[in-house]
Every structure is written in C-alpha cells, then in structure tokens.
Amino acid sequence: MSPLIEARDLTKKYGKHTALDHATFNVQPGRIVGLIGPNGAGKTSALRAILGLSSYQGHLRVLEREPFADRAALMLDACFIADVAVLPSWLRVDDAIDFVAGIHPRFRRERAAHLLAKTQIGGKRRMRELSKGMKTQVHLALTMAIDAKLLVLDEPTLGLDILARRAFYDALVNDYMDDTRTILITTHQVEEVENLLTDVIFIEKGRIVLDCSLEDIATRYAAVAVAEEQLAAARAHRPFHERRTLGKTVLYFERPDFDGLAAFGEVLTPSVSDLFVAKLSGIST
Amino acid sequence: MNQYAWLIRREFWENRAIWIVPAVIGAALTLGALFGKLEIGGLFTQTQAHAVGGVMLFAFGVTFFVVMNLYATWYLVDCLYSDRKDRSILFWKSLPISDTATVLSKLVTGVIVIPLVYFVAADVSTLLIAFIISVRARSAFGGALWQPDVWLQLQVLWLYLIVTTAIWYLPFIGYLLAISAWAKRAVMLWTILPPLALYLVERWFFGTHVVGTLLWDRTYDYAARAFSEPSGRGAWVTTVIHADSFTTPGSVWTLLDPVDFVTSPATWIGVVVGIAFIIIAIQLRLRRTET
C-alpha cells in the first residue's frame, strides 16, 4: 500500500531560519501517528506543509496530492483541527453545521447532531459565548462528522483542562478511529498521547530523529538499569543515552545486542516519553 | 445551494451590518416621514411639488449610496484580514474551499451584494415614505413622491451606478483586497501608506506627479466617463418656489453616457489593473495563513 503521507527532503525556510531541514518520513494508512518534538522543533511547519497551508521545498505527497497546489481538493479527504480556539466568534453552532453540510460532500449532519446532542451546547449560541472546552467539542463534532481518510491535529488540547483533554482523546479513539482512517497528532506533551499512538516520529531542529512504529520500538531500542560496578562493561555496548537514578544508571541502546545486555540486568523496552528524552538529549548523565 | 451561495451567506452572518445599516437608515427616514413637518414654505403647485418630490427621492437615494460606499470600502479592507487576525482562517482553510473561491466571494459581496442590499432598502423605504406622505399631506405635496417616471429613472440610475462604479473603481477594489490579504496589522493604515509613500518619494526625488495624477484621475474621471452634461431642449428644468429657484436635469436619460464609458480605454485599462490586484490577493491568500 502506498503511504498516505510521503515526505522526502521536506524543507521549509523562513528567511534565514530553517524550520524543516530535509525531513523524510512516511505515514501509512490506518495508523495513529504522533509527530513529537519540543517547541519550535518544526512540528507546526511540517503540518502546515502537509495541509497545504504553506509552500515548501522538497517532495511531499498527501493522499497522492500536492498539498499546496491542491489544498481545496485535499480537504475533501483530509481534515484538521489546527487549534481549538479558531472557530470564528460570530458563528452560531447551527450555522456552522449548516455551512459545513453545505460545503463538504462528505459531512454527515446526523453524526454531528448526534455528537453535539451529548453536550449541553445550544444550537443558537455563538462561539464567543462558549468556553474553550465547549468550543473544542463543537469543533471536534464538526470534524468527526466528516468521512475523511486523514485527520490532522496540531496540539489539539493546548489550554484545555485535564477533564476536557481526557474527553477529547476518548472521543477520538472510541467514536472516530477505525481502520479506514489515519490520524496525525503533533504535541510536545508525549505522556498524553503515548498510549493511543501506533507510530511515533520525533523531530528536532527541523530534522527527523526517529520514525518508528511502537511494535518496532521493542526490537530497536532497549533500556537497562546497570549497577555502578558494571557501568564500564555496559558502556562498551555503546549506549546513546544515560540517565542516573537512585543507585543505578539507566542506559539506552539502539539496535541492542539483547543477549549481551541481559548480563547487566533486566532488558526493558523504553516508554515513548523515555525514548523521547533519550533521543533528544543524547549522551548525558 | 452551491458553494458561492454558502460563502455569501457566510458574509451575512459575519457582517450583520450589511443589512442592519441600510435598515436603520430606512427606518430613520420613514420615522421622519411619519412624524416630521410636511408643509415646506406653504402651498405648492403641482409642478413645484413634482420638482421638490423628485429632488427628495434623489436625496434619499444619495443618502443610501454614500453610506453604502463607505461601508463597502471598509468591508473590502477588512474581509481578508479579520479571519487572519482571529486565526479562524485555520478553520476556513480546513474546508474544501479554494482560496480563489474565497477571494471572489468577498469581491462579489463587496461590489454586487452590498450595493444591491442598499438598493432594495432604498426602494422599500422610499415606497413607504411616499405612501406615508400621500396619506398625511393634504396639499398638492401629498402626491409629490408618487412619480413613476422619476422612480423608474432612479432604478436605472442605481443599477447604472452599481455596474459602472464596480468596473471603473476595480483597481481600487482589487488593491483593497490585496492589502486586506497582506497586512499583518493596522490594515487601514496600510491601505493609505503605499500610495502616499509613492506619491511623496516621486515628488521629492523626481519632482514629478505621475502617481498622484494617476490616482487623482482614477478618482475623479469617473463622472466624466460615465455621465455627460445634458444639453438641448428640456435638458434642464428650473423650478421657482417663492423667492427661490433651482435647476434640475430634465431626466436621467440624458445624463447617462454608457457609450463613452464602454468605449473609453481608461475603463478597460482599469479593469486589467484591477484583475491583476485580485490575482495578487488570491496569491497572498494562499500563502498568508496568519497575521
């Protein structure tokens, strides 16, 4: 199957600043992919290119289209929530549904109505009268009612409290995701999404530093907590990151020699957040 | 309903002033007719009433037309800026609507939809006022506003103005859209600054007035291109009321000059420049997603 998103040497410059530096990655259909990186790493630049919101250099195909040249057509099959606070303040909830229903051939009005019926948001209310959490629910209802192949979410829960965040991700996984869909999420809060992802892409300073499915993390990466006296021997296996904890040092290995490492302690699969920290801080103690 | 119909409906949701302002003007004029003093300077003859009524109908139309132009100008300056300012452009761009369709829908709203709304509001309120005055006034003035011939002429004048100003001022209209799609802030200031800067730079460094003359001519040549000085018998009518007299054109027909307007190269050069600015506005809309 051809990849849903295919980026090769994707580069974006703003004046002298390089936001994306020859980024190469693929997103396969049916996956939930986290594009993870610190603030200013190039996540948003990558998303904007993917969504046709900005120009770029390099090769980029999304659903076999060139996003910047073909955004309107792309949006028939892809949808996005770039920020939860972007529904216009003057728009009424009912009018928003009417408008999207009128514009978008794949919008299923009864589904939006069903999703909104679960909330206490009246159709006559304008967006400016709603709380941030309510606006998110409206935006999510509008977006989830679209039969799209790709859903892109950029820091979708920024500024939401813990209840609204949890509700957001529950709705996403339970009511929306099925094997015909693909979701790409950017976030700098790894812990929040690591349980729902199938793939992770780490980005730093505009470069892709890791592109891996969660199943593959277990075979490609290992973490071992090593006692002080064995540290020198363990280091011979060339860890790419070390982290000192109580009495022990956790060493992280890429393409590990599982049998050899077993001598130093239990070989564990690092969590996404641990791997994120390990990958982005490199050798440190 | 097709995409453009939805996009224009959207403009009405966002800019409720499109219909509120003309409705308020119409209501104010109607209230004036309901409660105002009607007998101006005593009794009229039929001819005098006819002349005064014609001028009044024209004045109502002018009121609507002037406010309409101010509002439409403001609309064009703001329309591609406001959704970048509040970031709602990220919502609109998540829908399968091309940037060309978006810009064209704003153009159509600014130069056709808004003028038509004012036109209808002017018609409805002048009809109401004519009815009220014919009921209230007991003198010859009662029928002053029931003038089907003047009425018909004003309809033609309105439509002629809407079409010809849209064509003649297309460079300005396109320019406003381009600035609206481009400015990061202070969009009003940015509409004035570039031409002013060009004018001053040219004046200081070259001592010429090419830019100033171009802008001046485009602004003021409209009347000369679209209208002509009435001449011949019955072209002008002078009405005397007591010690005062005033002269009005005999009819609108002799005023309009569509042939000169359509055959003038200046008209079509303007259209080309206007289209260029609109294309620039679309390109900017493609690239600028945030202020």
Image (cartoon, grey):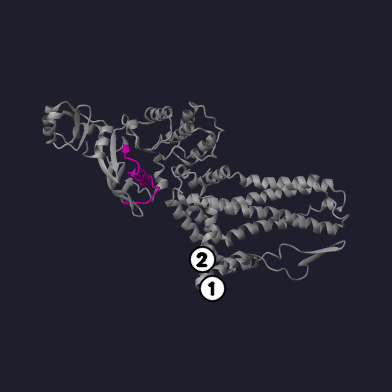
Q: Position of residue B252 (x, y in %)?
A: 72, 62
Residue that mark 2 sits on: B198
* Mark 1 surroundings: few (<14), some (14-19) or many (≥20) residues within 10 A: some
Q: Compare residues B153 and A87 and report the one nearer the observer.
A: A87
> Which mark, by number, is residue A20?
none
Which residue ends up furthest to the bottom in the rendered image?
Answer: B207
> Which mark, by number, is residue B208?
1
Q: Position of residue A255 (x, y in %)?
A: 16, 36
Discs 2 and 1 carry the same chain letter: yes
Q: Position of residue B127 (x, y in %)?
A: 74, 48
**Tag 2's secondary structure?**
helix
The chain holding disc 1 is B
Magenta range is: A34-57
* The quadrant where residue B228 appears: bottom right
The amino acid sitting under disc 2 is Leu
Q: Position of residue A52 (x, y in %)?
A: 39, 47
The chain holding disc 2 is B
Q: Can the viewer see residue A27? A: no
Q: Marks 1 and 2: in contact by CB < 8 Å? A: no
Work out whether A37 lies above or below B158.
Answer: above
**Tag 1's secondary structure?**
loop
Q: Is residue A227 magenta?
A: no
Q: Compare residues B271 and A191 and report the one nearer the observer.
A: A191
* The quadrant where residue A51 appears: top left
Left or right of residue B231: residue A212 = left
The amino acid sitting under disc 1 is Thr
Q: Earlier in the sequence, mark 2 or mark 1?
A: 2
